[in-house]
Image (cartoon, helix red, strand yellow):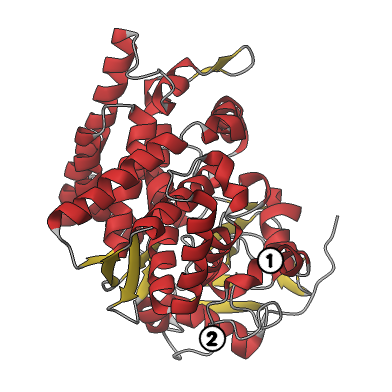
Protein backbone atom coordinates (compact mmCIF):
# COMPACT_ATOMS: atom_id res chain seq x y z
CA UNK A 1 0.00 0.00 0.00
CA UNK A 2 1.44 3.36 -0.97
CA UNK A 3 1.97 5.80 1.86
CA UNK A 4 0.63 9.34 1.63
CA UNK A 5 3.64 11.62 1.48
CA UNK A 6 3.75 14.07 4.35
CA UNK A 7 5.89 17.12 4.90
CA UNK A 8 9.66 16.89 4.87
CA UNK A 9 11.14 17.06 8.35
CA UNK A 10 12.79 20.38 9.22
CA UNK A 11 16.55 20.11 9.56
CA UNK A 12 18.54 21.36 12.53
CA UNK A 13 21.00 23.97 11.33
CA UNK A 14 24.64 22.95 11.43
CA UNK A 15 27.96 23.51 9.70
CA UNK A 16 27.92 23.46 5.86
CA UNK A 17 30.08 20.34 5.52
CA UNK A 18 29.82 18.62 8.89
CA UNK A 19 26.25 19.37 9.92
CA UNK A 20 25.66 18.95 13.66
CA UNK A 21 28.62 16.61 14.18
CA UNK A 22 30.41 18.74 16.78
CA UNK A 23 27.18 19.69 18.56
CA UNK A 24 26.30 16.02 18.96
CA UNK A 25 29.81 15.11 20.04
CA UNK A 26 30.02 17.88 22.64
CA UNK A 27 26.43 17.82 23.96
CA UNK A 28 24.07 15.43 22.24
CA UNK A 29 21.29 15.78 24.86
CA UNK A 30 21.39 19.56 24.64
CA UNK A 31 21.39 19.33 20.85
CA UNK A 32 18.27 17.15 20.82
CA UNK A 33 16.58 19.52 23.27
CA UNK A 34 17.44 22.51 21.08
CA UNK A 35 16.15 20.69 17.99
CA UNK A 36 12.73 20.29 19.59
CA UNK A 37 12.63 23.86 20.86
CA UNK A 38 13.60 25.33 17.49
CA UNK A 39 11.87 23.01 15.03
CA UNK A 40 9.14 20.99 16.74
CA UNK A 41 8.46 17.35 17.39
CA UNK A 42 10.05 15.63 14.37
CA UNK A 43 13.44 16.98 13.32
CA UNK A 44 16.08 15.77 10.87
CA UNK A 45 19.63 15.98 12.23
CA UNK A 46 22.69 15.39 10.04
CA UNK A 47 26.27 14.81 11.13
CA UNK A 48 29.52 14.09 9.34
CA UNK A 49 31.10 14.90 6.00
CA UNK A 50 29.46 14.08 2.65
CA UNK A 51 29.80 10.43 1.74
CA UNK A 52 29.69 9.16 5.31
CA UNK A 53 27.09 11.56 6.65
CA UNK A 54 24.68 10.19 9.26
CA UNK A 55 21.06 11.30 9.25
CA UNK A 56 18.77 10.72 12.23
CA UNK A 57 15.14 11.67 12.74
CA UNK A 58 14.42 12.90 16.25
CA UNK A 59 10.85 12.19 17.42
CA UNK A 60 10.09 14.19 20.57
CA UNK A 61 6.33 14.20 21.22
CA UNK A 62 4.52 11.76 23.48
CA UNK A 63 2.32 10.62 20.57
CA UNK A 64 5.38 10.15 18.37
CA UNK A 65 7.16 8.09 21.02
CA UNK A 66 4.06 5.93 21.41
CA UNK A 67 3.89 5.38 17.66
CA UNK A 68 7.55 4.35 17.41
CA UNK A 69 7.68 2.16 20.51
CA UNK A 70 4.15 0.75 20.59
CA UNK A 71 1.68 1.55 17.81
CA UNK A 72 4.06 0.79 14.93
CA UNK A 73 6.77 -1.04 16.85
CA UNK A 74 7.14 -3.68 14.12
CA UNK A 75 8.22 -0.94 11.72
CA UNK A 76 10.87 0.47 14.08
CA UNK A 77 13.49 -2.17 14.78
CA UNK A 78 16.70 -2.45 16.78
CA UNK A 79 18.72 -2.64 13.59
CA UNK A 80 20.96 0.38 14.03
CA UNK A 81 24.73 0.41 14.49
CA UNK A 82 24.55 1.14 18.22
CA UNK A 83 22.49 -1.97 19.03
CA UNK A 84 24.77 -4.07 16.84
CA UNK A 85 27.76 -2.94 18.91
CA UNK A 86 25.90 -3.86 22.12
CA UNK A 87 25.17 -7.31 20.64
CA UNK A 88 28.83 -7.81 19.81
CA UNK A 89 29.95 -6.89 23.33
CA UNK A 90 27.16 -8.16 25.60
CA UNK A 91 25.47 -10.84 23.52
CA UNK A 92 22.05 -11.23 21.96
CA UNK A 93 19.95 -11.22 25.12
CA UNK A 94 16.60 -9.60 25.79
CA UNK A 95 17.96 -6.09 25.30
CA UNK A 96 19.10 -6.63 21.71
CA UNK A 97 17.42 -9.76 20.30
CA UNK A 98 14.58 -9.48 17.78
CA UNK A 99 11.80 -11.44 16.08
CA UNK A 100 11.47 -15.09 17.13
CA UNK A 101 14.68 -14.99 19.20
CA UNK A 102 13.24 -12.19 21.31
CA UNK A 103 9.79 -13.76 21.64
CA UNK A 104 11.27 -17.09 22.72
CA UNK A 105 13.56 -15.44 25.27
CA UNK A 106 10.75 -13.28 26.61
CA UNK A 107 8.46 -16.29 27.06
CA UNK A 108 11.15 -18.19 28.96
CA UNK A 109 12.13 -15.24 31.15
CA UNK A 110 8.69 -13.71 31.83
CA UNK A 111 7.77 -16.15 34.68
CA UNK A 112 10.91 -14.99 36.52
CA UNK A 113 9.57 -11.42 36.68
CA UNK A 114 6.05 -11.87 37.98
CA UNK A 115 5.16 -9.43 40.73
CA UNK A 116 5.06 -12.21 43.32
CA UNK A 117 8.49 -13.50 42.32
CA UNK A 118 10.05 -10.04 42.26
CA UNK A 119 8.54 -9.10 45.62
CA UNK A 120 10.47 -12.02 47.05
CA UNK A 121 13.74 -10.17 46.40
CA UNK A 122 12.92 -7.34 48.81
CA UNK A 123 14.92 -8.90 51.65
CA UNK A 124 18.04 -9.19 49.46
CA UNK A 125 17.75 -5.50 48.53
CA UNK A 126 17.32 -4.53 52.19
CA UNK A 127 20.34 -6.61 53.19
CA UNK A 128 22.58 -4.83 50.69
CA UNK A 129 21.42 -1.36 51.78
CA UNK A 130 21.97 -2.33 55.41
CA UNK A 131 25.53 -3.36 54.54
CA UNK A 132 26.15 -0.13 52.64
CA UNK A 133 24.83 2.23 55.31
CA UNK A 134 26.72 0.28 57.99
CA UNK A 135 29.90 0.85 55.97
CA UNK A 136 29.15 4.58 55.91
CA UNK A 137 28.69 4.54 59.67
CA UNK A 138 31.79 2.44 60.40
CA UNK A 139 33.99 4.62 58.20
CA UNK A 140 32.71 7.82 59.76
CA UNK A 141 32.04 9.17 56.27
CA UNK A 142 30.93 12.79 56.37
CA UNK A 143 30.04 12.85 52.68
CA UNK A 144 29.67 10.37 49.83
CA UNK A 145 29.24 10.54 46.07
CA UNK A 146 25.70 9.22 45.93
CA UNK A 147 25.93 8.22 42.26
CA UNK A 148 29.02 6.11 42.86
CA UNK A 149 27.58 4.60 46.03
CA UNK A 150 24.28 3.72 44.39
CA UNK A 151 26.14 2.11 41.48
CA UNK A 152 28.03 -0.03 44.01
CA UNK A 153 24.85 -0.94 45.85
CA UNK A 154 22.80 -1.71 42.74
CA UNK A 155 25.50 -3.92 41.25
CA UNK A 156 25.82 -5.93 44.46
CA UNK A 157 22.06 -6.22 44.77
CA UNK A 158 21.50 -7.48 41.23
CA UNK A 159 24.50 -9.83 41.52
CA UNK A 160 23.11 -11.28 44.74
CA UNK A 161 19.70 -11.77 43.14
CA UNK A 162 21.26 -13.31 40.04
CA UNK A 163 23.90 -15.52 41.62
CA UNK A 164 22.83 -16.07 45.21
CA UNK A 165 26.05 -16.21 47.24
CA UNK A 166 28.43 -16.07 44.21
CA UNK A 167 28.64 -12.30 44.38
CA UNK A 168 32.14 -11.01 45.03
CA UNK A 169 33.93 -12.41 41.99
CA UNK A 170 31.20 -11.26 39.62
CA UNK A 171 31.06 -7.77 41.15
CA UNK A 172 34.80 -7.25 40.86
CA UNK A 173 34.91 -8.30 37.21
CA UNK A 174 31.86 -6.25 36.26
CA UNK A 175 33.19 -3.15 38.04
CA UNK A 176 36.43 -3.49 36.12
CA UNK A 177 34.88 -4.43 32.77
CA UNK A 178 31.66 -2.52 32.22
CA UNK A 179 33.08 1.03 32.05
CA UNK A 180 35.73 0.12 29.46
CA UNK A 181 33.38 -2.04 27.42
CA UNK A 182 30.63 0.58 27.56
CA UNK A 183 32.99 3.30 26.33
CA UNK A 184 34.13 1.02 23.50
CA UNK A 185 30.53 0.32 22.45
CA UNK A 186 29.69 4.02 22.56
CA UNK A 187 32.71 5.04 20.49
CA UNK A 188 32.07 2.45 17.80
CA UNK A 189 28.29 2.86 17.84
CA UNK A 190 28.49 6.53 16.95
CA UNK A 191 31.46 6.42 14.60
CA UNK A 192 30.69 6.50 10.85
CA UNK A 193 33.68 4.24 10.14
CA UNK A 194 35.09 1.45 12.30
CA UNK A 195 37.96 -0.97 11.76
CA UNK A 196 37.00 -4.63 12.26
CA UNK A 197 37.00 -5.80 15.86
CA UNK A 198 39.64 -8.44 15.19
CA UNK A 199 42.24 -5.93 14.01
CA UNK A 200 44.96 -5.67 16.69
CA UNK A 201 44.53 -1.98 17.50
CA UNK A 202 45.12 -0.86 21.11
CA UNK A 203 41.40 -0.16 21.59
CA UNK A 204 40.38 -3.54 20.17
CA UNK A 205 42.93 -5.37 22.33
CA UNK A 206 41.78 -3.64 25.52
CA UNK A 207 38.13 -4.36 24.70
CA UNK A 208 38.92 -8.00 23.91
CA UNK A 209 40.66 -8.42 27.26
CA UNK A 210 37.78 -7.09 29.36
CA UNK A 211 35.26 -8.85 27.13
CA UNK A 212 37.02 -12.18 27.74
CA UNK A 213 37.19 -11.61 31.51
CA UNK A 214 33.48 -10.79 31.67
CA UNK A 215 32.49 -13.85 29.65
CA UNK A 216 34.78 -16.13 31.65
CA UNK A 217 33.34 -15.24 35.05
CA UNK A 218 29.76 -15.70 33.81
CA UNK A 219 30.61 -18.99 32.09
CA UNK A 220 32.39 -20.28 35.19
CA UNK A 221 29.50 -19.54 37.55
CA UNK A 222 26.97 -21.01 35.10
CA UNK A 223 29.06 -24.16 34.54
CA UNK A 224 29.57 -24.67 38.28
CA UNK A 225 25.88 -24.24 38.95
CA UNK A 226 24.89 -26.71 36.22
CA UNK A 227 27.48 -29.33 37.15
CA UNK A 228 26.69 -29.25 40.87
CA UNK A 229 22.95 -29.30 40.35
CA UNK A 230 22.69 -27.25 43.53
CA UNK A 231 21.94 -23.60 44.07
CA UNK A 232 23.08 -21.54 47.04
CA UNK A 233 20.60 -20.32 49.61
CA UNK A 234 16.99 -21.11 48.84
CA UNK A 235 17.60 -21.88 45.15
CA UNK A 236 15.50 -18.95 44.04
CA UNK A 237 18.28 -16.79 42.58
CA UNK A 238 17.68 -15.79 38.97
CA UNK A 239 20.51 -17.91 37.60
CA UNK A 240 18.97 -21.07 39.04
CA UNK A 241 15.61 -20.10 37.61
CA UNK A 242 17.18 -19.34 34.22
CA UNK A 243 18.94 -22.72 34.21
CA UNK A 244 15.62 -24.41 35.02
CA UNK A 245 13.52 -22.32 32.61
CA UNK A 246 11.98 -24.64 30.04
CA UNK A 247 8.82 -25.11 28.04
CA UNK A 248 7.56 -27.58 25.46
CA UNK A 249 7.35 -24.79 22.90
CA UNK A 250 10.63 -22.98 23.56
CA UNK A 251 12.98 -25.59 25.03
CA UNK A 252 15.56 -24.15 27.41
CA UNK A 253 18.57 -21.84 27.35
CA UNK A 254 21.91 -23.26 26.27
CA UNK A 255 25.14 -22.07 27.92
CA UNK A 256 25.67 -19.18 25.52
CA UNK A 257 22.09 -17.96 25.87
CA UNK A 258 22.34 -18.15 29.66
CA UNK A 259 25.46 -16.01 29.61
CA UNK A 260 23.79 -13.45 27.36
CA UNK A 261 20.77 -13.13 29.63
CA UNK A 262 23.01 -12.82 32.69
CA UNK A 263 25.04 -10.05 31.06
CA UNK A 264 21.90 -8.14 30.06
CA UNK A 265 20.52 -8.40 33.60
CA UNK A 266 23.83 -7.23 35.06
CA UNK A 267 24.02 -4.29 32.65
CA UNK A 268 20.40 -3.15 32.60
CA UNK A 269 19.64 -4.28 36.13
CA UNK A 270 22.20 -2.18 37.94
CA UNK A 271 23.00 0.90 35.85
CA UNK A 272 19.38 2.00 35.43
CA UNK A 273 18.47 1.60 39.10
CA UNK A 274 21.71 3.23 40.22
CA UNK A 275 20.98 6.27 38.06
CA UNK A 276 17.44 6.68 39.40
CA UNK A 277 18.47 6.24 43.02
CA UNK A 278 21.58 8.39 42.83
CA UNK A 279 19.77 11.32 41.28
CA UNK A 280 16.81 10.95 43.63
CA UNK A 281 19.22 11.36 46.56
CA UNK A 282 20.97 14.26 44.83
CA UNK A 283 17.67 16.05 44.17
CA UNK A 284 16.40 15.50 47.71
CA UNK A 285 19.70 16.84 49.03
CA UNK A 286 19.08 20.02 47.02
CA UNK A 287 15.45 20.45 48.15
CA UNK A 288 15.02 20.42 51.94
CA UNK A 289 11.22 20.75 51.88
CA UNK A 290 10.80 17.66 49.71
CA UNK A 291 13.37 15.83 51.81
CA UNK A 292 11.40 16.71 54.96
CA UNK A 293 8.21 15.33 53.40
CA UNK A 294 10.00 12.10 52.46
CA UNK A 295 11.50 11.74 55.96
CA UNK A 296 8.11 12.27 57.57
CA UNK A 297 6.45 9.66 55.34
CA UNK A 298 9.19 7.08 55.95
CA UNK A 299 9.12 7.67 59.72
CA UNK A 300 5.33 7.50 59.90
CA UNK A 301 4.90 4.39 57.74
CA UNK A 302 7.88 2.33 58.81
CA UNK A 303 8.44 3.51 62.38
CA UNK A 304 12.05 2.34 62.21
CA UNK A 305 11.44 -1.14 60.80
CA UNK A 306 12.89 -2.53 57.57
CA UNK A 307 10.53 -2.03 54.61
CA UNK A 308 9.26 -4.87 52.48
CA UNK A 309 7.36 -5.26 49.23
CA UNK A 310 4.03 -4.73 51.04
CA UNK A 311 5.11 -1.20 52.00
CA UNK A 312 5.45 0.21 48.48
CA UNK A 313 1.86 1.43 48.20
CA UNK A 314 2.16 3.11 51.60
CA UNK A 315 5.13 5.22 50.47
CA UNK A 316 3.61 7.34 47.69
CA UNK A 317 5.81 10.40 48.21
CA UNK A 318 9.02 8.35 48.10
CA UNK A 319 7.71 6.78 44.88
CA UNK A 320 6.90 10.19 43.42
CA UNK A 321 10.41 11.43 44.25
CA UNK A 322 11.85 8.52 42.28
CA UNK A 323 9.53 9.09 39.34
CA UNK A 324 10.46 12.77 39.22
CA UNK A 325 14.16 11.83 39.35
CA UNK A 326 13.56 9.48 36.43
CA UNK A 327 11.84 12.29 34.57
CA UNK A 328 14.75 14.68 34.95
CA UNK A 329 17.50 12.07 34.67
CA UNK A 330 16.14 9.10 32.69
CA UNK A 331 18.62 6.22 32.70
CA UNK A 332 17.92 5.67 28.99
CA UNK A 333 17.88 9.29 27.76
CA UNK A 334 17.79 8.33 24.07
CA UNK A 335 16.29 5.21 22.46
CA UNK A 336 17.21 4.32 18.89
CA UNK A 337 15.36 2.45 16.19
CA UNK A 338 15.53 2.03 12.40
CA UNK A 339 12.47 2.38 10.18
CA UNK A 340 11.70 -0.60 7.94
CA UNK A 341 9.21 1.16 5.68
CA UNK A 342 8.40 4.79 5.06
CA UNK A 343 5.78 6.13 7.43
CA UNK A 344 4.42 9.39 8.78
CA UNK A 345 5.10 10.59 12.30
CA UNK A 346 3.40 13.80 13.34
CA UNK A 347 2.56 14.64 9.73
CA UNK A 348 6.22 14.29 8.69
CA UNK A 349 7.53 11.53 6.42
CA UNK A 350 10.18 9.26 7.91
CA UNK A 351 11.75 7.38 4.98
CA UNK A 352 12.44 3.66 4.84
CA UNK A 353 15.79 2.76 6.36
CA UNK A 354 16.01 5.96 8.40
CA UNK A 355 17.58 5.97 11.84
CA UNK A 356 15.07 7.28 14.38
CA UNK A 357 15.46 8.28 18.00
CA UNK A 358 12.89 8.92 20.66
CA UNK A 359 14.31 10.83 23.60
CA UNK A 360 12.94 10.64 27.13
CA UNK A 361 15.45 13.39 27.95
CA UNK A 362 13.54 15.73 25.62
CA UNK A 363 9.97 14.45 25.98
CA UNK A 364 10.31 14.57 29.77
CA UNK A 365 11.02 18.29 29.38
CA UNK A 366 8.43 19.00 26.70
CA UNK A 367 6.59 22.22 27.60
CA UNK A 368 3.28 20.81 26.33
CA UNK A 369 3.31 18.23 29.15
CA UNK A 370 5.45 19.75 31.89
CA UNK A 371 5.11 23.25 33.32
CA UNK A 372 8.51 24.73 34.28
CA UNK A 373 10.08 21.44 33.20
CA UNK A 374 13.49 21.84 34.86
CA UNK A 375 11.94 22.31 38.31
CA UNK A 376 12.01 19.33 40.71
CA UNK A 377 8.41 18.67 41.73
CA UNK A 378 7.41 15.16 42.85
CA UNK A 379 3.74 16.19 42.91
CA UNK A 380 3.77 15.94 39.13
CA UNK A 381 3.19 12.24 39.85
CA UNK A 382 0.05 12.31 41.93
CA UNK A 383 -2.57 9.97 40.43
CA UNK A 384 -4.59 12.94 39.17
CA UNK A 385 -1.61 14.58 37.49
CA UNK A 386 -0.51 11.33 35.85
CA UNK A 387 -4.01 10.67 34.51
CA UNK A 388 -4.09 14.12 32.89
CA UNK A 389 -0.96 13.56 30.77
CA UNK A 390 -0.46 11.48 27.60
CA UNK A 391 0.77 7.95 28.31
CA UNK A 392 4.18 8.53 26.74
CA UNK A 393 4.90 11.93 28.26
CA UNK A 394 6.97 9.86 30.75
CA UNK A 395 8.58 6.62 29.60
CA UNK A 396 11.83 5.92 31.48
CA UNK A 397 11.34 2.16 30.97
CA UNK A 398 10.68 2.42 27.23
CA UNK A 399 7.31 1.18 26.06
CA UNK A 400 5.32 -1.13 23.86
CA UNK A 401 6.25 -4.80 23.43
CA UNK A 402 9.91 -4.00 24.19
CA UNK A 403 9.23 -2.23 27.50
CA UNK A 404 11.71 -3.14 30.24
CA UNK A 405 10.80 -6.49 31.74
CA UNK A 406 12.38 -5.49 35.03
CA UNK A 407 10.55 -2.25 35.73
CA UNK A 408 8.68 -3.58 38.77
CA UNK A 409 11.95 -4.91 40.19
CA UNK A 410 13.61 -1.54 39.59
CA UNK A 411 10.83 0.32 41.42
CA UNK A 412 10.79 -2.20 44.28
CA UNK A 413 14.56 -1.95 44.71
CA UNK A 414 14.57 1.84 44.43
CA UNK A 415 11.73 2.52 46.87
CA UNK A 416 13.14 0.14 49.50
CA UNK A 417 16.66 1.48 49.14
CA UNK A 418 15.63 5.15 49.21
CA UNK A 419 13.35 4.63 52.21
CA UNK A 420 16.10 2.85 54.18
CA UNK A 421 18.68 5.54 53.44
CA UNK A 422 16.20 8.23 54.50
CA UNK A 423 15.54 6.33 57.72
CA UNK A 424 19.21 6.53 58.62
CA UNK A 425 20.47 9.79 57.15
CA UNK A 426 19.72 13.38 56.33
CA UNK A 427 21.56 14.64 53.24
CA UNK A 428 22.77 18.02 52.05
CA UNK A 429 24.18 18.59 48.58
CA UNK A 430 27.86 19.44 48.22
CA UNK A 431 27.74 19.44 44.41
CA UNK A 432 24.74 21.43 43.27
CA UNK A 433 25.18 20.74 39.53
CA UNK A 434 26.04 17.33 38.12
CA UNK A 435 26.95 17.29 34.41
CA UNK A 436 25.74 14.24 32.50
CA UNK A 437 26.32 12.58 29.14
CA UNK A 438 24.70 9.60 27.41
CA UNK A 439 26.57 6.32 27.15
CA UNK A 440 24.77 2.97 27.04
CA UNK A 441 22.91 4.54 29.95
CA UNK A 442 23.02 8.08 31.35
CA UNK A 443 26.39 8.75 32.97
CA UNK A 444 27.50 11.50 35.34
CA UNK A 445 30.47 13.53 34.11
CA UNK A 446 31.21 14.78 37.62
CA UNK A 447 30.59 13.89 41.27
CA UNK A 448 27.31 14.14 43.17
CA UNK A 449 28.60 14.44 46.71
CA UNK A 450 26.23 14.76 49.64
CA UNK A 451 26.99 15.46 53.31
CA UNK A 452 25.61 12.77 55.60
CA UNK A 453 24.01 13.49 58.95
CA UNK A 454 22.92 10.38 60.92
CA UNK A 455 19.30 10.45 62.06
CA UNK A 456 17.71 8.96 65.14
CA UNK A 457 14.05 8.05 64.89
* Res. 180 visible in picture: yes
Vertical side of 457 occupied by 43: above or below: below
Mark 1 is surrounded, within 10 Å at the Cα level, by few (under 14), some (14 to 19) or many (20 or more) other residues, namely few
Tell me which residue sits at (84%, 60%) in the image: 2
Q: Which residue is mark 2?
A: 34
Mark 2 is surrounded, within 10 Å at the Cα level, by few (under 14), some (14 to 19) or many (20 or more) other residues, namely some
Say which of 4 and 302 sits in front: 302
Say which of 67 and 379 sits in front: 379
Chain-order first, disc 2 or disc 1:
2
Q: Position of residue 91 (x, y in %)?
A: 39, 38
Q: Which residue is mark 1?
A: 382
Q: Position of residue 294 (x, y in %)?
A: 50, 65
Quadrant containing the N terminus is: bottom right
In this picture, residue 58 sits left or right of residue 242: right
Helix or strand or loop: what does disc 1 sit on? loop
Vertical side of 322 occupied by 101: above or below: above
Q: CA distance from mark 2 to mark 1?
A: 29 Å
Q: Position of residue 60 (x, y in %)?
A: 64, 73
Say which of 373 and 211 sits in front: 373
Dividing the picture into quadrants, the one containing residue 17 is bottom left
The circle on residue 333 is: none
Tell me which residue sits at (34%, 11%) in the image: 230
Vertical side of 22 occupied by 441: above or below: above
Helix or strand or loop: what does disc 2 sit on? helix
Dividing the picture into quadrants, the one containing residue 427 is bottom left
Amino acid sequence: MAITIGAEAPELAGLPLLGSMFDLKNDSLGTFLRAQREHGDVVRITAGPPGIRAVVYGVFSADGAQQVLAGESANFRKDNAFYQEIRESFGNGLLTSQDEDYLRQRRLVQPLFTRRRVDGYASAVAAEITTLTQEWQDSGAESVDVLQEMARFALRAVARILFGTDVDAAVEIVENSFPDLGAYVLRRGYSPLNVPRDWPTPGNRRAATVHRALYEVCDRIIAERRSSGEAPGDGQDLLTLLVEAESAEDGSFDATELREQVLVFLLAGHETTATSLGFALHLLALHPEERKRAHEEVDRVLAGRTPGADDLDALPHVTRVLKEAMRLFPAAPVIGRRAVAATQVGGVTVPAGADVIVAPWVTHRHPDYWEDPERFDPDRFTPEAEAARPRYAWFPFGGGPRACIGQHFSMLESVIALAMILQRYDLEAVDTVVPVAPAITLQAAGPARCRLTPRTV
